[in-house]
Amino acid sequence: MYFVYLAQCEDGSIYTGITTDVARRLKQHQEKKGGSYTRSHAVKKIVRTERFRTKGRALKREAQIKRLPREKKLELVRSSE
């Protein structure tokens, strides 16, 4: 299983990524071992996850979300609360 996740950073920005283990990835981000963006924008929490059976589908969804404007990303977060 693959997960596309949206993480809220301490500065209010939203980071989108892909992983097979959301808890492990959150820990990596919080230890500043994640991607370069999250090393300088500390991750506060995961605010949305979506599950996919294949890596290809997850990567396509990740790319789709990354192209969205901030307000649309925030709508995704609100819809999962």
Image (cartoon, rainbow, N blue to C red):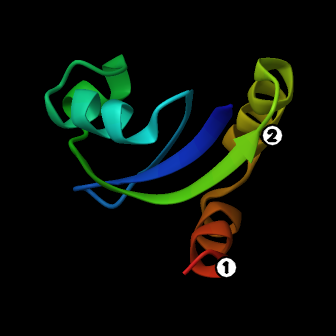
Q: Amino acid at mark 2?
A: Gln
Q: Residues within 10 Å of mark 1 (few under 14, many from 20)?
A: few
Q: In the image, is residue 17 above or below residue 71?
A: above
Picture disc at residue 79: 1
Picture disc at residue 4: none
Quadrant of the snapshot with the N terminus: top right
Q: In the image, is residue 49 above or below residue 30?
A: below
The residue located at (36%, 31%) in the rendering is 25
Quadrant of the snapshot with the C terminus: bottom right
Q: CA distance from mark 1 to mark 2?
A: 17 Å
Residue 74 in the image: x percent, y percent? 58, 69
Q: Secondary structure at mark 2?
A: helix
Q: Disc 2 marks which residue?
A: 64
Q: Secondary structure at mark 1?
A: helix
Between marks 1 and 2 in the image, the one whose residue lies nearer the viewer:
1
Q: Amino acid at mark 1?
A: Ser
The residue located at (71%, 45%) in the rendering is 51
Residue 78 in the image: x percent, y percent? 59, 79
> Image quadrant of residue 20?
top right
Q: In the image, is residue 60 above or below residue 15?
A: above
> Image quadrant of residue 5?
top right
